[in-house]
């Protein structure tokens, strides 16, 4: 499972932030890792330099072998929290979609 980060021009991902995010995503999606080929993480700061609640956005797109991508979005106060929430939403979506496929 490849994890790729994309950011807007206001967000800089340092190695100090990237490493724990990769661990969080890898561990959170580990039970789906044999079906996911790539995960794209899009991070942005919707209010730019201004302070605000829930202005950090994370959109995670999981690409499954032989299927259309699945995308979820989460907003939070920090990018770490946004990623954590998006991973939880993605796990729920994957459970639902893959569960339906197993029932056929």
Image (cartoon, helix red, strand yellow):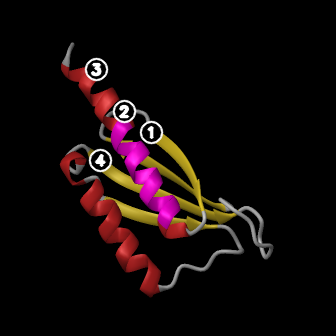
State the extent of the magenta-drawn residues as a range: 81-92
Q: Is residue 101 above or below residue 38?
A: above
Residue 85: image location, x then y, percent: 46, 53
| Residue farthest toward the front in the current orientation of the protein | 53
Q: Which mark is residue 70?
A: 1
Residue 14: image location, x then y, percent: 50, 85
Q: Nearer the viewer, mark 3 or mark 4?
A: 3
Q: Nearer the viewer, mark 2 or mark 1?
A: 1
Check if residue 51 falls in the magenta segment. Answer: no
Per the image, the residue denoted by label 3 is: 100
Q: Which mark is residue 91?
A: none
Per the image, the residue denoted by label 2 is: 67
The local secondary structure at tag 4 comes to strand
Q: Earlier in the sequence, mark 2 or mark 3?
A: 2
Q: CA distance from mark 1 to mark 4?
A: 10 Å
**Contact between labelled residues 4 and 3, with CB atoms less than 8 Å apart:** no
Q: Nearer the viewer, residue 1 or 28?
A: 28
Main SS class of the magenta portion in the image: helix
Q: Earlier in the sequence, mark 2 or mark 4?
A: 4
Q: Earlier in the sequence, mark 1 or mark 4?
A: 4
Dot 3, how many residues are within 10 Å of its Cα: few (below 14), some (14-19), or many (20+)?
few
Check if residue 91 falls in the magenta segment. Answer: yes
Residue depicted at 36% across the width and 54% down the height = 38
Q: Earlier in the sequence, mark 1 or mark 3?
A: 1
Q: CA distance from mark 2 to mark 4?
A: 10 Å
Per the image, the residue denoted by label 4 is: 36
The local secondary structure at tag 2 comes to loop
**Contact between labelled residues 4 and 1, with CB atoms less than 8 Å apart:** no
């Amino acid at each position: 499972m490849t994890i790729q980060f994309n950011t807007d021009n206001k967000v800089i991902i340092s190695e100090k932030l990237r490493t724990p995010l990769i661990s969080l995503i890898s561990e959170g999606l580990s039970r789906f890792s044999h079906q996911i080929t790539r995960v794209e993480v899009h991070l942005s700061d919707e209010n730019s330099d201004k302070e605000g609640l829930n202005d950090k956005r994370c959109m995670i797109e999981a690409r499954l072998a032989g299927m259309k991508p699945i995308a979820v979005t989460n907003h939070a106060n920090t990018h770490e929290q946004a990623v954590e929430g998006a991973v939880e939403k993605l796990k729920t979506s994957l459970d639902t979609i893959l569960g339906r496929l197993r029932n056929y």
